[in-house]
Image (tube, rainbow, N blue to C red):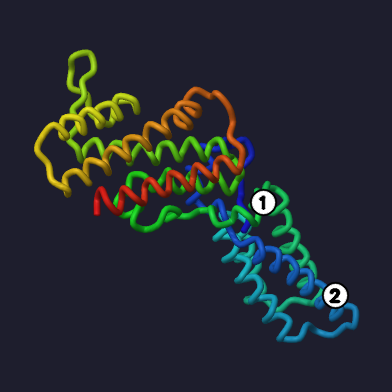
Amino acid sequence: MAVICPAGMGPEGFFRLWDLMNHFNAYNLALRAANFTAAEANFRRYSETGRAAVASAVEMFISELGFAADDLYASGMQSASNEMRRVLRTVQCEQKHPSALEVLAQGVGHRVLQELRRRRFLRIANGRRQYLDQQHLFGHIVSDRFPNAVGDIRAAGNCLAAECDTAAVFHLMRVAEHGLRAVAKKLRVKLKHKGQNQPIEYADWNDVIVGIKNQITEARKLSRGPKKEAALQFYSDIADQCEYMKDIWRNTIAHTRRPYSGPEAIAVTDRVKAFMVRLASELLG
């Protein structure tokens, strides 16, 4: 798979436009260019021998023009696609000498190569292909139960695929934050800031974690049975995990203290995935 990255576009804009045809099947376009070169050679041969182009060669050229128009359009190269359709109509409507068809085949072949030459491509390493453009990188259960986290999950995977490892950790911390706030809401944590009630969404990690732990402490003072104790232990474990992520990764990424390597980012991915799957299965199950 090839990825178009428009010149001058930063990572944020790149991923915003990911769905707007920024990835395409490069093999198809390369195949079109090769087939146009073959058609050019065929028409040249007919022209040199003085024979009219056989119908099968013209039909094949027409077919390739249609495929090229579709492939270019799917790749976001609309102007080139329109040119292919214009040439296609010309070939369909007018009987042309092989020398004229040779020129047309050469022209459209060069246009495909020109479109490819004008773009820059990002190669995804084979070891990272599994992260590319994954809507459900953490599984359907997480996507279904944390729909607001899907964008960051997908962005984290794309950052890993592109070897933007520090950016991947940034998105992963945003994913984990969705989980943290879901726990706080489940426990009906109430937070205040400067004496005023503060929505969970606007509180920082530490305040939310402290609120969760305070809520657990208060709940332990009440009479409880085995089921309640198990639930409190679950919430306590989750709060500890959140505090670990905050201290080890979230604070580091928020304050630009250091970059992350590939193995580190993949380890964070595995840890956050396990965290979110557990929440989706047990907290919201």
Q: On the image, numbered disc 2 is attached to which residue?
A: 44
Q: Residue furthest top?
A: 194
Q: Which mark is nearer the camera, 2 or 1?
A: 1
Q: On the image, numbered disc 1 is attached to which residue?
A: 123
Quarter assignment of residue 33 = bottom right
Residue 280, how many percent across, how many down? 31, 51
Residue placed most toward the observer, 214 or 23: 214
- Kindly state the secondary structure of the residue where label 2 is placed: helix
> Is the residue 185 above or below the residue 119 in the image?
above
Residue placed most toward the observer, 118 or 9: 9
> Is the residue 208 above or below the residue 22 in the image?
above
Residue 29, how many percent across, how many down? 66, 63
Task: Tell me, yes or no, whether the two marked residues, 2 and 1, touch with CB atoms within 8 Å.
Answer: no
Residue sitting at 48 percent across and 35 percent down?
170
**Label 2 vs 1, first from the N-terminus:** 2
Q: Is residue 222 visible?
A: yes
Q: Residue furthest right?
A: 48
Viewport quadrant of the N terminus = bottom right
Q: Give, as a three-letter code, the residue at label 2.
A: Arg
Residue 92, how many percent across, how many down? 63, 76
Q: Give, as a three-letter code, the residue at label 1.
A: Arg
Residue 188, how many percent across, how many down? 17, 35
Q: Is residue 281 left or right of residue 30?
A: left
How far is the residue under mark 2 from the one under mark 1?
Answer: 36 Å
Viewport quadrant of the C terminus = bottom left
Residue sitting at 39 percent across and 41 percent down?
175
Q: Is residue 78 visible?
A: no
